Image: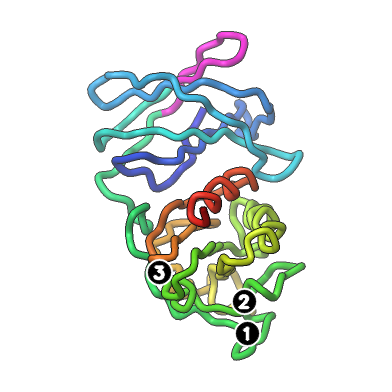
Amino acid sequence: MLVVSSDLAVGRERVLVSAIDAENRSLVTDQPIELVFVAPDGSPSEEVPGRFIWAVPDVRGLWVAEVDFDRAGAWTFRIRTGDDRVIEGAPFSVSPEPRTVGIGERAPPSDSKTLPDTPLESLTTDPAPDLRLYRTTVAQAVGSGRPSVIVFATPAFCTSETCGPVLDAAKPLIDAYPGVNWIHVEIYENLYASSLDDLELTRAVVEWGLPNEPWVFVVDGAGIVTHRFEGVLDGAELVAALDRVTS
């Protein structure tokens, strides 16, 4: 059992937990689990539920839990399965502050590229792009007085193979939340590089401090980040976040 979230800090965090077997293959099971997180001094938390979500639909998935971390340092955890088995997880780190833009912080007004100034094929590697995701810059969105959803993902170059599924989870909600700015920002600038080693991060990715991909941020009408989602994301989580900023 592994915590696969890469940017955990003191405060309330969304934690992703994965299970792998001896051959380093991700296990797939949709049963819920209960988790206990143990602080550096050995004090355990209350049990918190872990909800299974698909990372790549019908291929592999992991659990998501909301956890309050009251101190930085090396934490551990254990899970209790539905049949009362207890499994110890690997240690993981909690930092004093997040590297990525955190909840409650002002969203960086990044000058991302958009249509029609930039050709679509230079804006996205999504094989089925929704043009509405490329009409507004991040700076325009977070300064508009309207809530925003900003998806940082690169379907063609995604190391976790979850960028496409995350975009696919967001697209169906565009019509349901017409008062929200919807933006997709590619991770890389030069999508036609001759090799992966030649890919360059976009300025927005650097300004938002992203250590990996994909990431999804929900920003309220005042330009403040209210939710951040690393890695996998399902529609239910995004709907809950949007309902909070649009109510």
Image mark count: 3
Q: Quadrant of residue 119?
A: bottom right
Residue at 52% x, 57% y is: 246
Q: Residue at x 71, y 70 (%)?
A: 130
Q: Position of residue 24 (x, y in %)?
A: 60, 34
Query: What's the distance in space between the residues labelled 3 and 2, CA to CA?
Result: 19 Å
Residue 57, image x and y in percent? Answer: 73, 43
Q: Which mark is drawn over residue 206?
A: 3
Give the mark nearest the N terminus, 3 or 2.
2
Q: State which region is magenta.
A: 78-90
Reading the image, the residue beneath label 2 is 134
Could you tell whether 70 is left or right of 193 in the image?
A: left
Residue under the point 45% across and 61% down: 219
In the rendered structure, the answer to whether residue 95 lies left or right of residue 27 reads: left
Dots 1, 3 in contact, CB < 8 A: no
Residue annotated with mark 1: 115
Mark 1: secondary structure: loop
x and y, in percent, of residue 200 in the image: 50, 74
Query: Which residue occupies the foreground of this view, 74 or 57?
Result: 57
Instruction: Tell me the crowding category of disc 1: few under 14, some 14 to 19, or many 20 or more residues within 10 angstroms, Cα based.
Output: some
